[in-house]
Image (cartoon, grey):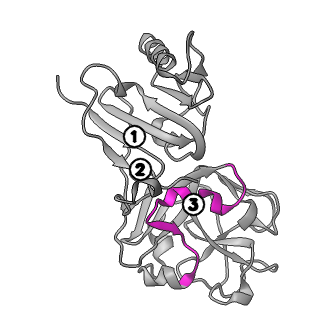
């Protein structure tokens, strides 16, 4: 029997010494390369604040914090509107003063937590407001109201500290920690067919349509009961569990593995159906972004 492709997505690089430090984003299908040192990573997060999405940048990158580092990493003026997907925005940690993001983002007096400069492009029915001078970051997310496309916030005066995302309209802009480090996006198969084993750790729980099979649990016997139940259900594509909580569930819909890989910052582990059974083991391709 031919070896199946085995792709593992593991959250926690720091504890293992950072040997995969060049990886950025959770999935290449949800990543936009702007330069060798800057990527836009699609991400969903429910904890308020842009910084809550830091994990998707991996261990060798961070959410971009200044125009100077963006320019040093090669993103020229006009680069965002020419390369970003239509209708998507990739947020930075650069936000405007109490007057909004209308000044020069390179000046400390123009910065605060009101409105967020982003690498974005209008399109697909979505329009991002134009902000003050900030190089390639010529759009902002925020202003009046409490939402735009897939982004939402509680206060229009503190988008930086209150921003949340459902992952449909972009995410965050990641800059390499070292301006000379070449970043590479991790490849997650869009399909979860019989040939693709995908493992996720430290992602949000209960995002699939799930069931509790008899005898389920997070110990060896409980996980085997979950696997058996998944094998018996043609609609089941994965199992999820939370270590120490004595729970394991079969997943039959509601989300794809590629989408689930972007929902970081949780306590769940997820394994696709292709990961067990005869012929499923091989040397895994391991990507270890840092945890939230």
In magenta, the rendered stretch is 46-67
Residue 134 higher or lower than 16, as above or below: below
Q: Which residue is mark 1?
A: 190
SS for dot 1: loop
C-alpha separation, residue under disc 1 versus residue under disc 3? 23 Å
- Residue at 49% across, 17% down: 226
The numbered disc on residue 29 is 2
* Comes first in the chain, label 1 or label 2: 2
Whether the residues at callouts 1 and 3 have beta carbons within 8 Å, the answer is no
Depth check, front residue: 44 or 203: 203
SS for dot 2: helix
**Mark 2, residues whose alpha carbon is within 10 Å: few (<14), some, or many (≥20)?**
some
Residue 269 higher or lower than 82, as above or below: above
Q: Which residue is mark 3?
A: 54
Marks 2, 3: nearer the viewer: 3
C-alpha separation, residue under disc 1 versus residue under disc 2? 7 Å
From the top left corner, tell me how far across and down residue 38 is, in percent.
Answer: 44, 70
The numbered disc on residue 147 is none
Q: How many marks?
A: 3
From the top left corner, tell me how far across and down residue 32 is, in percent.
Answer: 43, 61
Residue 43 higher or lower than 114, as above or below: above
């Amino acid at each position: 029997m031919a070896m199946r492709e085995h792709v593992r997505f593991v959250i926690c690089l720091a504890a293992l010494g950072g040997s995969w430090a060049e990886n950025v984003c959770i999935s290449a299908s949800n990543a936009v390369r702007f330069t060798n040192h800057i990527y836009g990573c699609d991400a969903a997060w429910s904890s308020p604040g842009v910084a809550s999405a830091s994990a998707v940048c991996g261990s060798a990158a961070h959410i971009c914090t200044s125009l100077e580092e963006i320019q040093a990493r090669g993103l020229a003026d006009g680069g965002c509107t020419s390369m970003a997907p239509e209708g998507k925005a990739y947020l930075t940690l650069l936000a405007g003063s109490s007057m909004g993001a209308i000044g020069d983002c390179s000046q400390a007096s123009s910065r605060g937590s009101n409105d967020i400069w982003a690498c974005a492009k209008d399109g697909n029915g979505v329009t991002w407001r134009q902000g003050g001078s900030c190089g390639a970051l010529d759009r902002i997310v925020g202003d009046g109201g409490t939402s735009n496309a897939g982004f939402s916030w509680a206060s229009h005066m503190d988008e930086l500290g209150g921003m949340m995302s459902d992952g449909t309209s972009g995410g965050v802009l990641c800059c390499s920690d070292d301006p000379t480090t070449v970043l590479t996006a991790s490849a997650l198969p869009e399909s979860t067919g019989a040939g693709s084993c995908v493992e996720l750790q430290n992602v949000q729980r209960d995002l699939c349509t799930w069931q509790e099979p008899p005898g389920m649990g997070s110990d060896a016997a409980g996980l085997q009961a979950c696997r058996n139940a998944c094998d018996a259900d043609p609609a089941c594509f994965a199992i999820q569990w939370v270590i120490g909580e004595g729970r394991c569930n079969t997943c039959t819909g509601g989300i794809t593995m590629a989408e689930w890989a972007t929902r970081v910052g949780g306590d769940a582990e997820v394994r696709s159906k292709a990961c067990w059974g005869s012929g499923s083991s091989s040397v895994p391709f391991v990507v270890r972004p840092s945890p939230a």
